[in-house]
Amino acid sequence: MEPNILSKLAVSVVPLLIAIVFHEVSHGFVANRLGDPTAKFTGRLTLNPLAHIDPMGTVILPLMLLALDLPVFGYAKPVPINPMNFKNPRKGMAISAAAGPVTNILLAIFSILFFKIIFMSSAVVLPGAINAPILQPLTLMMIYSIRINVFLAALNLIPIPPLDGGRVFVGILPHKQAVSYSKIEPYGIFIVYGLLFTGIAGYFVFPLEKLILSLVQLF
């Protein structure tokens, strides 16, 4: 690998792992609180990345994006959820699905706050230390964390199942329309890939990404 790619990998791998692991664990955690212990029983309520790594989504895809100098994102193995364990399956599934993007937004806010603490503390205690060998990579990690989490939140809110936005959309539709719309889920991932490769998804993702970023920057 080129030095530039290695340096990007060094400061982006930890934020990416945190973003996708917390995203998936939040689905299982909320589902468990709502009455579905499937994720708990399958060992997915853990922050150990090894339990969530998907070879393509967690390793190969991010490396390809880094090599192509494109925005870095990825995905983990989906946390198993059985909606039949919820008192209200559609509502429970929608809330569990929403937990992922909400978690990414909260992580972006935390990263901004942490970045400000690092920057202000170093400026007061050790002027010029923001460029020090330790603080500079840490600062870059927070910047990558903000970008990755905001992008993941926006991407997952595309209203096509099996993405989180699609499941939330199914949860708020009237029953008849929800049943009809949910039938596209087996083909949903191919639709999403088609939208991504043609660039059509950008018309939804980029404005939403900009909106989320403007909201988290309030902090």
Image (cartoon, rainbow, N blue to C red):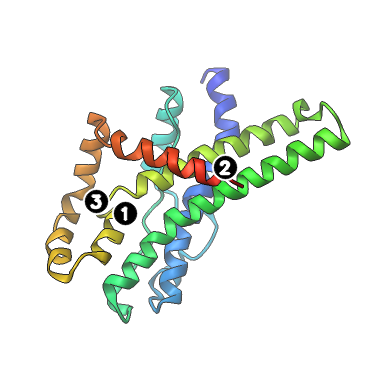
Q: Which of marks 2 and 3 is in front?
A: 2
Question: In what element is the residue under mark 2?
Answer: loop
When the figure is inspected, residue 186 is found, relative to residue 33, above or below; the finding is above
When the figure is inspected, residue 27 is found, relative to residue 21, above or below; the finding is below
Of pointers 2 and 1, the one earlier in the residue sequence: 1
Of pointers 2 and 3, the one earlier in the residue sequence: 3
State the residue in front, 153 or 38. Answer: 153
According to the picture, the residue beneath numbered tag 1 turns out to be 165
Give me the residue at 42% from left, 48% from top: 153
State the residue in front, 55 or 217. Answer: 217
According to the picture, the residue beneath numbered tag 3 turns out to be 160
Are the residues tagged 3 and 1 within 8 Å (C-beta)? yes
Query: Alpha-carbon neighbours of circle 2 within 10 Å: few (<14), some, or many (≥20)?
Result: few
Q: Looking at the picture, how far across and down is residue 217, in whole percent?
A: 57, 42
Of pointers 3 and 1, the one earlier in the residue sequence: 3
According to the picture, the residue beneath numbered tag 2 turns out to be 217
Question: In what element is the residue under mark 3?
Answer: loop
Three-letter amino acid code at the position of disc 3? Ile
Are the residues tagged 2 and 1 within 8 Å (C-beta)? no
Give me the residue at 44% from left, 37% from top: 210
Q: Looking at the picture, how far across and down is residue 199, in whole percent?
A: 26, 30
Query: Alpha-carbon neighbours of circle 1 within 10 Å: few (<14), some, or many (≥20)?
Result: many
Q: Looking at the picture, how far across and down is residue 171, in whole percent?
A: 27, 66
Q: In this view, does 175 lie to the left or right of 1?
A: left
Three-letter amino acid code at the position of disc 2? Gln
Question: In what element is the residue under mark 1?
Answer: helix
Q: Is residue 118 left or right of residue 109?
A: right
